Amino acid sequence: MMPSWFAQLPAPLNQSPVLLERLAWPDAESTLQEVLLLPVGAMEQHGPHLPLNTDTVIAESTCQLASALTGAPVLPALGYSVSLGHTVKWPGTFSLFHETLMLTVREIARWAADSGWKRLLIVNSHYGNDAALRCAVDRLRHDLGGSLLTATRNTWDLTPEIAGRFTHDAADWHANEAETSLMLFLDPSSVVRERMAIADDPDRTAGCVFPHRVAHTSLNGVTGQPSLGTAEQGALLISRMGEALADLIQRARAEAPPLSWSP
């Protein structure tokens, strides 16, 4: 199934992503030599103007575009993750603890390995997941050795150019111009446009020693300038993100450890 926004990209695509959940098992079996993608998002507040599933939409969309470009199969996204820092001040945030996400990812990875996949790339779009996912990958590297090569990457820093687009209006960004632009392009009906112009809230974390919770750094859950968001900027940004992930997949397909060793 091809997402409708594929046709609106700067370089329109007419090929569909490989969504593993829509395949019968013989067709899933035919993807075992590909790099398996696991999108990870969040269910959390994204200011007064963006939907709670913003991070999940961004993770899924980046993977779908990269899949269409490479043929890599995409697992269903994990939509609940580590959002502890967003507190319950703004209703709609639901969080797992770090250890829960780590165990969930490890169990998914074991099923992938036992089924025959050799490479798994976790594609994350929520900052709060980063530490847990890196720990999960380190444990999988120990537990599975070379039977399943596993890595995690964040959608917002796949290249220096992409990282600059996310941080230009706030170093500790959230629901900012970049995320707003992406959602205006990917799912425009979910954006409450009349609230965008009054949603801007500055980054108050400069010089802080401790990582404070969002309720202590933002008035409305936003850090940045969503008022600057446009669908046109979102189209360009998701194109860069999908292309960067596709390039990573191409490199991951043939990568082997630099040295051989057996315990």
Image (cartoon, rainbow, N blue to C red):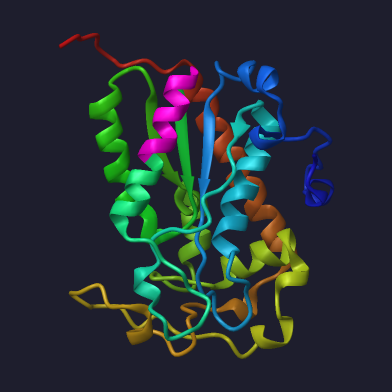
Residue in the image at 32% along x and 17% along y = 146
Residue 131: x %, y % from top left: 30, 53
Asked whether, in this view, residue 137 is left or right of residue 196, the answer is left
Residue 176: x %, y % from top left: 54, 73
Vertical order, 120 against 242 (above or below): above
Closer-to-camera residue (157/14): 14
Residue 49: x %, y % from top left: 63, 80
- Looking at the rendered structure, the number of numbered marks drawn on it comes to 0
State the extent of the magenta-drawn residues as a range.
Answer: 106-118
Q: In the figure, residue 261 lies in which quadrant? A: top left
**Is residue 162 at least partly visible in the picture?**
yes
Quarter of the image with the N terminus in it: top right
Residue in the image at 71% along x and 69% along y = 230
Residue in the image at 53% along x and 60% along y = 165
Closer-to-camera residue (10/94): 94
Residue 179: x %, y % from top left: 58, 66
User: Is residue 113 highlighted in magenta?
Assistant: yes
Asked whether, in this view, residue 208 is left or right of residue 120, the answer is left
